[in-house]
Image (cartoon, grey):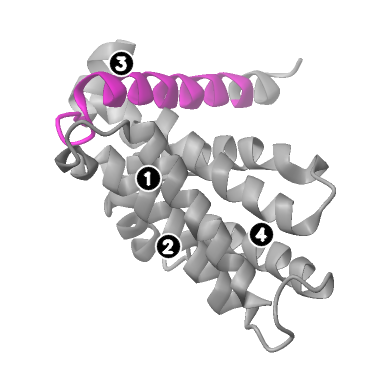
């Protein structure tokens, strides 16, 4: 291995270490309480070293945000084996909800915090991960239309936004403890029944 290759490998290893320890610190203390200095102390480097890799905390959050979307898409890919197009769409929504509830910090990073998108705006870039997510839902809606589950004039993009908003609403209400007002209710059952009613509503789109 040449000197250049070794330097590239070492640079990647340090980049990965920064992200790994930053994520661990975020999970431990929360995003707002984590600073570049705390991350630097954790990896035993100076803050200046981290700034060689990331412009600021927002850009570091953006990198973690993109990693989190990779994890989400890996989870969502499990529904590809569902043969029926409508059942596959339902499985997508259910998997999305499960992932959000099981990974609250990542979900906050992907959909609740403004910092990652502020970093994108500074770079004059669009939210590619969001585009990829909505395109996936649009594709599944279009497939359902082709198989007669939805009306021919249904706009796949509008339907995809509605579907995404529904599952996002369920996850965010639960993660922010808004469902706690339903005292005595099994919240897992409440979420499942809410999603089930929504899927029944989708069937009226025929």
Q: Position of residue 150 (x, y in %)?
A: 70, 75
User: How packed is label 3: few (under 14 Cα within 10 Å), some, or many (20 or more)?
Assistant: few
44 shown above or below 100 = above
- Which image quarter holds the N terminus? top right
Which label lies toward us, 3 or 1? 1
Estimate the spatial distance between the alpha carbons at disc 1 and disc 4, rounded to whole Å: 19 Å
Q: CA distance from mark 3 to mark 2?
A: 42 Å
Q: Which residues are magenta?
A: 8-35
Q: Earlier in the sequence, mark 2 or mark 4?
A: 4
Kind of element beneath mark 1: helix
Name the residue carrying label 2. Answer: 165
**Residue 32 colored in magenta in the image:** yes
Answer with mark 3 or mark 4, whichever residue precedes in sequence: 3
Q: Give the mark toward the camera: 3 or 2.
A: 2
Q: Secondary structure at mark 3?
A: loop
Q: Which residue is mark 4?
A: 136
N-terminal-most mark, 1 or 2: 2
Q: Residues within 10 Å of mark 4 (few under 14, many from 20)?
A: some
> In the rendered image, is residue 116 in sight?
no
| Left or right: 79, with 45 as reference point | right
Q: Does 70 lie within the magenta span?
A: no
Farthest-out residue, bottom: 153
Query: What residue does disc 1 label?
Result: 171
Marks 3, 4: nearer the viewer: 4
Does residue 151 sit above or below 162 in this rendering?
Answer: below
Mark 3–mark 4 distance (CA, rounded to whole Å)? 40 Å
Label 2: few (<14), some (14–19) or many (≥20) C-alpha neighbours in 10 Å: few
């Amino acid at each position: 291995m040449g000197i250049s290759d070794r330097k590239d490998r070492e640079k990647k290893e340090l980049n990965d270490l920064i992200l790994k320890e930053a994520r661990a610190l975020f999970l431990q203390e929360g995003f707002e309480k984590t600073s570049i200095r705390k991350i630097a102390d954790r990896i035993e480097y100076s803050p200046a070293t981290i700034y060689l890799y990331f412009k600021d905390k927002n850009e570091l959050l953006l990198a973690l945000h993109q990693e989190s979307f990779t994890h989400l898409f890996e989870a969502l890919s499990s529904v590809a084996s569902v043969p029926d197009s409508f059942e596959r769409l339902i499985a997508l929504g259910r998997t999305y909800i499960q992932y959000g509830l099981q990974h609250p910090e990542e979900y906050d990073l992907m959909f609740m915090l403004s910092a990652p998108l502020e970093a994108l705006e500074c770079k004059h870039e669009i939210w590619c991960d969001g585009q990829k997510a909505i395109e996936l839902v649009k594709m599944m809606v279009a497939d359902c239309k082709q198989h007669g589950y939805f009306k021919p004039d249904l706009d796949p993009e509008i339907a995809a936004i509605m579907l995404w908003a529904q599952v996002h609403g369920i996850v965010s209400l639960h993660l922010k403890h808004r469902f706690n007002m339903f005292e005595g209710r099994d919240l897992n059952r409440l979420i499942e029944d809410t999603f089930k009613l929504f899927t029944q509503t989708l069937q009226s789109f025929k």
